[in-house]
Image: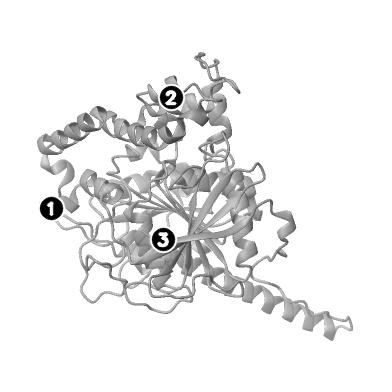
Amino acid sequence: MLEWLVALCIVILGVLIWPGPKYFGTESQPDALLRGLGAAGPNGRGRVVDRERSDGDGAQAAAAAGEARAVALVCKPSALANYLLKHCRTFTHYSPRVGWTWRASALLQSAYEACWPYRSPVQFVRDNLQLSDDGLVALDWAVPAYQKRRRTSSHSTSPVLLIIPNSFGKITRTVLKLCETSLSHGYLPAVFNRRSHNGTPLTTVRLQQFGDPADLREAVRYIRHRQPAGRLYAVSESTGSGLLLSYLGECGSSSYVTAAVCLSPVFRCQGWFEGGLSRPLQWALVLYQKMCLSRYRTVLGETVHTDALFSSCSLRGLEEALFCQPAGSATARPVPPGAWDAYWERNEPLRDVDEVAIPVLSVCARDDPVRGDAQSTIPMELFETNPHFFLLLTERGGHCGFSAQPEGGAAGGFSAVGSAAPPASGPEGLGPSWSHRALLEFFRATTDFFAAEERTKQLAARRRGLGAGAGGRAFQNRSVSACKRVPACSHNIHAIYNWQRSYTR
């Protein structure tokens, strides 16, 4: 408790004495992409610069000239990138809060989104999934409060939105508001809870490592078994992006996910654990994780040296005590040399990034106080060379904040099927977050793009078939599916699906 009070005092002191221009802006910023990185105006036209062709000179000049711009799209030029620039209006319409208001502070809006309670009108129904090693993870399905029928039909064609919270298990306002917004746009949101997170019982002495996607893989199989007719999309928040990127890289084209979005991700995770976070914020996260693990102190004592665990003052110390000690070691022993590096060889989110086979959008802010300096923590070369990765980089927004100026009469976004939908207003009278509107438009645009590509292929196949038939050869008509289907088989899923309880957050 003393560490928490000290950390809070330091944060408040830093906010009060830090120069105002560091966090607060005094001039309005235009809603346009950085010229050279992807310029687009209100007419929807845009372009993406090939930095390899320009040797980086044009991009550097554009970044310098557009330093005060609101948002930039960084990606490798492709047909999908051009389609996104043309059809994703939200990408070019972001007006961050400026002036002397606390919502313009990167630190304050980040703390607000992470810690301030949110009275969501959404209810949750929990599925406890028993895994192959008898461990338990949970899926919390969001349903409207007015809906009497709790269980969704397995024949529903509504898309499923799998939400992965941060790696510490904290359900933030961002997650709750995303559930509310996605419900209003026709999605079926499901929040993935790791072992021991958010009230999930810990039935094994094994916790989930930072980038181990084994548990998530079984959860995805269950979702496919339960909703075989609906597309699957995925969204991760903060450090939870490490798990999502690990899963997408390890599974490749067999991930069953149509498209994914990472909100304020942490890319270089080993360096972040080693000291990439400021000391007050690190103390706060360490204290929160200790509080969550304290209830399992007795059972963890069988395999983990709990004295070293609860005396740690850094994120690295906690991670080493949990996962880098020799197997079955409950006594104090030094961490073996090289164990820390070996741990991150298995858990680094970008270890299999070349195997990712779906579009992935990352939404980041330059002033993110949790991730750190954008120049050293964002792998720009990944977005410039890999056609599957897209980066929306804003000048302001903090960590999962992205507080925008209120828009009177603006369109709220698009539904899952592409039709316009009004913004979902919460109890505070605010519409959906800019980042939430951007990710929903990204999902809609990628789905429409691939559907159009599939129609083009089918039309070309028919034309080739007709031409072959005219030449005297028989043509066999084959239907091409836009989404690869795998027959659901509950016998291949080592999980028990139990509708256990419903509750309101």
Residue 334: image tag: none
Residue 345 visible to an observer of this rendering: yes
Up/down of 401 relative to 439, above or below: above
Q: Colour scheme of this structure image?
A: one colour
Q: Are marks 3 and 1 in contact (CB under 8 Å)?
A: no
Secondary element under disc 2, as helix, strand or loop, is helix
Check disc 3 and give the amino acid type: Tyr
Q: Which residue, given by chain and number where applicable, does mark 3 sit on?
A: 503
Up/down of 425 relative to 375, above or below: below
Q: Badge 3, how many Cα within 10 Å: few under 14, some, many 20+?
A: few
What residue is at 17 percent from the left and 44 percent from the top? 23
Q: Quadrant of residue 288?
A: top left
* Mark 3 / mark 1, whichever is N-terminal: 1
Q: Quadrant of residue 462?
A: bottom right
Q: CA distance from mark 3 to mark 1?
A: 35 Å
Up/down of 292 relative to 32, above or below: above
Q: Nearer the viewer, mark 2 or mark 3?
A: 3
Along the line of sight, the residue nearer the viewer: 310 or 299: 299
Q: Which residue, given by chain and number where applicable, does mark 2 sit on?
A: 309
Q: Quadrant of the C terminus?
A: bottom left
Check disc 2 and give the amino acid type: Leu
Q: Which residue, given by chain and number where applicable, does mark 1 sit on?
A: 101
Where is residue 7 shown, x and y percent of the image? 23, 31
Q: Quadrant of residue 154?
A: bottom right
Q: Nearer the viewer, mark 2 or mark 1?
A: 2
* Mark 2 / mark 3, whichever is N-terminal: 2
Along the line of sight, the residue nearer the viewer: 417 or 48: 417
Left or right placement of residue 80 versus residue 173 in this view:
right
Q: CA distance from mark 2 to mark 3?
A: 32 Å
Left or right placement of residue 333 versus residue 483 in this view:
left
Left or right placement of residue 400 versus residue 130 in this view:
left
